[in-house]
Image: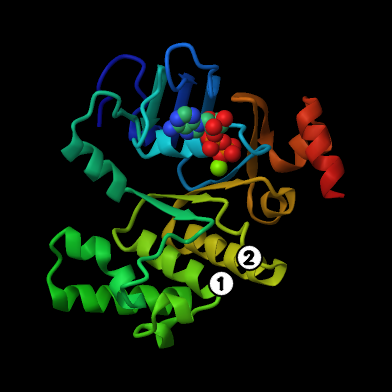
Amino acid sequence: MAPERPGAVAPSDGVAIEFQDVGKRFGKHADPVLDGVTLRIGAGEIVGVIGPSGAGKSTLARLINGLERPTSGRVLVHGRDHGGAREKELNALRTQIGMIFQQFNLFNSRTVEGNVGFGLQVAGVPAARRRERVAELLEFVGIADKAKAWPAALSGGQKQRVGIARALATSPSILIADEATSALDPQTTTDTLELLRRINSDLGTTIVVITHEMDVVREVCSRVAVLSGGRLVDHGDVYDVFDRPNSEVTRGLVRHAV
Ligand code: ADP
Ligand code: MG
């Protein structure tokens, strides 16, 4: 497929997400939340985005799935700039991008299978096909026995598996985990990261792991971007960045993680 306009990256270039000199501010006179962010995430990668609270990590996630628009620069997903996209196109974009969160964001008034099948129901997938798909997803994330359970009856790790199954329902090419393990204990975090790794290797999903925890990045990511005050202060292979940080912020994160 040819690029839509000069400078756009064709999907065949293997780039899943590209930020081109992206700035974001909320309100004309407010300080920028993101400033001059240029970043490429290759298809099939697991990339960490790390940085202190308020660095702009969640805003970066929301720019990827079109919940926010950049104030300047461009955000491309599989070579497409959805900057001027209409709601219908944005909805199509969002089915390509799964999101999971720290607080799981489950519907408490729906059972596990009701949660996982929700997006499929909205998309008009017939009930029989939906049941099949939900069963397959619950099996994949390892909670097939919890199909009829209510979220309130689940552990944190189980809730996150429901969140992951729900995010995968529409077979997204990109999964964004925004502090998805921050509410979990260390063992459950390890198990959840193992599941993310399996999603990446079995399904080929590009995964963006947003976190303030160094260990999470070390455990699962091949590359990492470090955000501080809305600027990208470090970026590269995890080993290189943590071994030879460019910035004081990264050095601080490395020191605190030891
Ligand atoms: P992080 O996820 O790294 O903690 P966020 O992206 O959530 O950071 O927030 C970065 C900064 O942007 C914070 O100062 C936050 O208050 C501000 N911010 C985020 N969303 C909005 C918004 N919708 N309106 C105004 N300010 C916002
Ligand atoms: Mg955040």
Residue 222 in view of the camera: yes
**155 or 133, nearer to the observer:** 155
Asked whether the residues under the numbered discs 2 and 1 touch, taking CB atoms below 8 Å apart as contact, a structural biologist would say yes
Q: Is residue 91 left or right of residue 246?
A: left
Q: Which residue is mark 1?
A: 157
**25 or 255, nearer to the observer:** 25
Q: Position of residue 108 (x, y in %)?
A: 37, 70
Relative to 146, does residue 112 appear above or below in the rendering?
Answer: above
Q: Position of residue 42 (x, y in %)?
A: 49, 38
**157 or 142, nearer to the observer:** 157
Residue at point 31% right, 73% down?
Answer: 110
Q: Which residue is mark 2?
A: 184
* Image quarter in which the N terminus is found: top left
Name which of mark 2 and mark 1 comes first in the sequence: 1
Relative to 160, does residue 24 appear above or below in the rendering?
Answer: above
Name the residue furthest bottom: 145
Q: Is residue 56 left or right of residue 17?
A: right
- Disc 2 from disc 1: Cα separation: 7 Å
Q: Position of residue 222 (x, y in %)?
A: 64, 46
Residue at point 67% right, 49% down?
Answer: 217
The residue carrying pointer 2 sits among few (fewer than 14), some (14 to 19) or many (20 or more) residues within 10 Å by Cα, namely: some
Residue type at mark 1: give it. Gly
Quarter location, residue 191: bottom right
**203 or 86, nearer to the observer:** 86
The residue carrying pointer 1 sits among few (fewer than 14), some (14 to 19) or many (20 or more) residues within 10 Å by Cα, namely: some
The label shown at residue 40 is: none
Residue at point 41% right, 32% down?
Answer: 13
Name the colouring of the figure: rainbow
